[in-house]
């Protein structure tokens, strides 16, 4: 109605620039030297936060022998990689690593902080999956560093008490790759 009353469209320079960017595909003209990130965990389903209980309520329920819904998850948007599982997650992460490769300068570094996790009482090796994906994306795997975790989370301690036979994960992996172009 306002535009009709004025007889023509009025936009700010910023709105015009945003509209132009939206209509054009993304291209990268500037390359970066390095990327440092921690990818999302696979299959961390979002949950209804309106049902959240307090830490004290959760702790009391656990001490009484009950269970709780561990982990808050990622946002529920369908495009959120953290909500994907198995092959879908790996395919999406391969695309992410390919895009990282595209924006890095030749010989640029990508440093990823990952942590293996437990599913169905088994260790899921996110580190080895990540190395394979990055090599598929064109990276050369250089080295790995370990970061010892200062402590286990409350939830990991409770899980280990319930399933003492399950391996504990006491470190994060810092994986270093080079863009071989």
Image: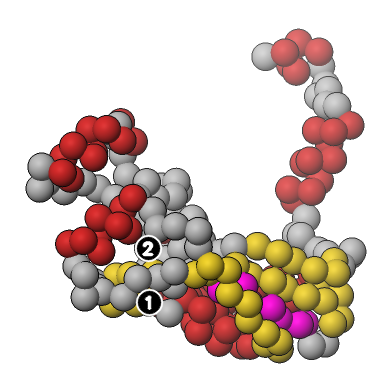
Q: Where is mark 1, residue-wise?
A: 124
Query: Height in image: 75 above or below 83?
Result: above
The residue shown at (56%, 64%) is 39
Q: Quadrant of the C terminus?
A: bottom right
Looking at the picture, does residue 48 appear above or below residue 43? above
Looking at the image, residue 156 sits to the left or right of residue 144; the answer is left
Q: What's the magenta bit mostly, secondary-structure-wise?
A: strand
Kindly report which numbered mark, 1 or 2, lies closer to the viewer in this rendering: 1
Which one is nearer the viewer's eye here, 30 or 161?
Answer: 161
The residue depicted at 44 percent of the width and 50 percent of the height is: 74
The image's mark for residue 43 is 2
Can you see residue 88?
no
Would you say residue 41 sits in the magenta stretch? no
Q: Secondary structure at mark 1?
A: strand
Residue occupying the far left of the picture: 65
> For the magenta stretch, what is the residue range?
173-179
């Amino acid at each position: 109605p306002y535009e009709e009353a004025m007889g023509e469209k009025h936009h700010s320079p910023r709105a015009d620039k945003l509209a132009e960017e939206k209509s054009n595909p993304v291209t990268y003209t500037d390359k970066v030297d390095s990327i440092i990130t921690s990818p999302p965990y696979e299959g961390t389903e979002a949950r209804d936060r309106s049902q959240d209980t307090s830490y004290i309520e959760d702790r009391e329920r656990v001490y009484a022998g009950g269970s709780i819904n561990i982990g808050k998850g990622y946002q529920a948007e369908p495009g959120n990689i953290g909500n994907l599982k198995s092959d879908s997650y790996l395919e999406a992460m391969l695309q992410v690593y390919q895009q990282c490769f595209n924006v890095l300068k030749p010989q640029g570094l990508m440093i990823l902080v990952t942590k293996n996790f437990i599913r169905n009482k088994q260790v899921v090796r996110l580190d080895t999956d990540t190395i394979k994906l990055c090599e598929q994306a064109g990276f050369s795997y250089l080295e790995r560093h370990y970061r010892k975790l200062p402590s286990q989370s409350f939830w990991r301690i409770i899980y280990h008490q319930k399933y003492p036979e399950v391996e504990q994960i006491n470190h994060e992996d810092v994986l270093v790759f080079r863009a071989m172009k």
